[in-house]
Image (tube, grey):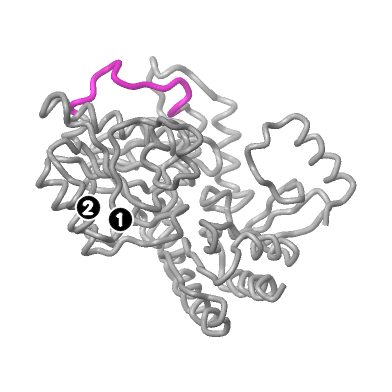
Amino acid sequence: MTGERAAELIQADHQYLLQSYVRADFVIERGEGVYLYDSEGRRYLDFVAGIAVNALGYGDRDVLKAINDQAERLIHVSNLYHTQPAIELAKLLVQSSPAFAKAFFCNSGAEAIEGAIKFSRRYARAHVGEGKTTIVAFDGSFHGRTMGAVAITAREKYREPFMPVMPGVRFARYNDLDSLAAVMGDDVCAVVVEPVQGEGGLRAAEPAFMQGVRELCQRYGALLVFDEIQCGVGRTGTLWAHEQLGVQPDMMTVAKPLAGGLPIGAVLMGQHVADTIHPGDHGTTFGGNPLATAVGTVVFRKISDPAFLAHVQQVSNYLDEALQDFANEHADQVIELRGRGLMRGVRIAGSASAVREAAHRHGLLVATAGEDVIRLLPPLIIEPQHVDEALSGLRAALRA
C-alpha cells in the first residue's frame, strides 16, 4: 500500500519525530469536503474527522476566508489586551445555554480540563475552605493526557506509566448511581463526566443517571462538570449533548471542533463559579488568540444554526437505521451499537484495529475506542450517500 514517496516520508518521520503514535502506512496530503487524499493520490472517505475536529470537513470556504482575513489583521497578541474575536466567540458560547455566564479560552481539551479542575478546587476553597478537593470521574473516562487530566482518566494504560499522578481522585461506574453514591462525600468538589464517552467506547449517559448525578452533586455541594470536548458542538444532533439529558452543568469543557482545526479549548461556567476566579488565578499565553477565536466564531455560528443542526439530526437518523441493518446483517460479528448522533460505536467480536486497517484498504477511515469498538466520527456535513459508502467499506473490512 505504501508507495516510494510515502515510504521516504514515513522513514523521515521515524527518524525525526518522537514515536508516540501508531500511524497508518500512508501520508495524508490534502482534503476536500468529506474526503482525504494521500501522497499517492488515493482517496479516503473520512469517518474520523481529526477525531471529531473537522466538523465542517475540508476546504470550507467560510473557514478559509476567516483564516485569511484575520491573519492579515492580527494573529496573536497577549491576553493583557482586549481583542474583538475573543469577545465575540465568548458571547456566542455563553448565550448558547442558560447554564453559562463566562468563558475561559485555552488551546486544547486537556487544557480545558486542567482549567476546570483548578476552578473546581478554587470554588470549593472559596465556599468551604481547605479539604474539599476530591474529583470524581468514571470508568471508561478519557479527559486528556496532561497530569491533572490523566489523573481523572480511568484507563490504566494512560495512567500507569506516569504514576504518581495527581492525588484526590475517585472513580465510579458509568451509568451506575449506586456506585457514584458510594464514592461521594463532603470532600468532593466536582464530578466530571462525559455525556457520551469517546475513548471509553461510545457509551451514552442515560437521562435518569445524569439527573441522579446532578442531585448527588447538589447534596454534597460539588460542581457538576460536563466534558463535551468530543461530543459537543453539534456532534450528537443537538448543539450540546447534555441538552438531550435535561440536566445543566456548573461547568463544561469544549474544544475539538470549535475552530475548524485550529488549536482551541474553552471552559464555560455559571456566574457562581466565575465569581470565585480572580485575576492571576489562571492564565494562558496562546489561548483565545485572535486567529483561533475569529475562526471559532465562524464555525460556531454555522454549526449552531438550526438548519445545520436539523441536517445533522436527519443524517444521524439515516445512519442509525443503516447501522441497525448492518448489525442485523452481521449478527455474528456485531455485538452492540452505541453512541448518539454522528458519534457512533460498533462493538464487534474481534479486533477493532484489524477492521480499521482493513477499512483503509477499501478507502475508508475509521477510528477505534478500546479493543473491540469501531468509532465513527464523520464530518457533520455528510449526506446519506456517504453513510452508504462508509458502510459498504465497513462490510468489506469485516470480510477481510
Q: In the picture, residue 206 is in which quadrant?
A: bottom left
- Residue on which disc 1 sits: 173
Q: Taking 266 as reference, is 81 above or below it?
A: above
- Along the line of sight, the residue nearer the viewer: 112 or 349: 349
Range of magenta residues: 275-288
Which secondary structure class fits the magenta region best?
loop
Image x and y of residue 246, in percent: 22, 60
Say left or right for 257 vs 395.
left
Q: Earlier in the sequence, mark 2 or mark 1?
A: 1
- Along the line of sight, the residue nearer the viewer: 118 or 349: 349
Quadrant position of the C terminus in the picture: bottom right
What's the residue type where badge 1 is placed? Arg
Image x and y of residue 300, in percent: 43, 46
- Residue on which disc 2 sits: 180
Q: Which residue is at 40% across, 28% downward?
A: 84
Quadrant position of the N terminus in the picture: bottom right
Secondary element at tag 1: loop
**Disc 2 and disc 1 in contact, CB within 8 angstroms:** yes
Image x and y of residue 63, in percent: 56, 43
Say left or right for 352 vs 188.
right
Q: Which residue is at 37% across, 21% downward?
A: 283
User: Count the marks: how many?
Assistant: 2
Is the residue marked by circle 2 packed among few (<14), some (14-19), or many (20+) residues within 10 Å?
many
- Along the line of sight, the residue nearer the viewer: 52 or 147: 147
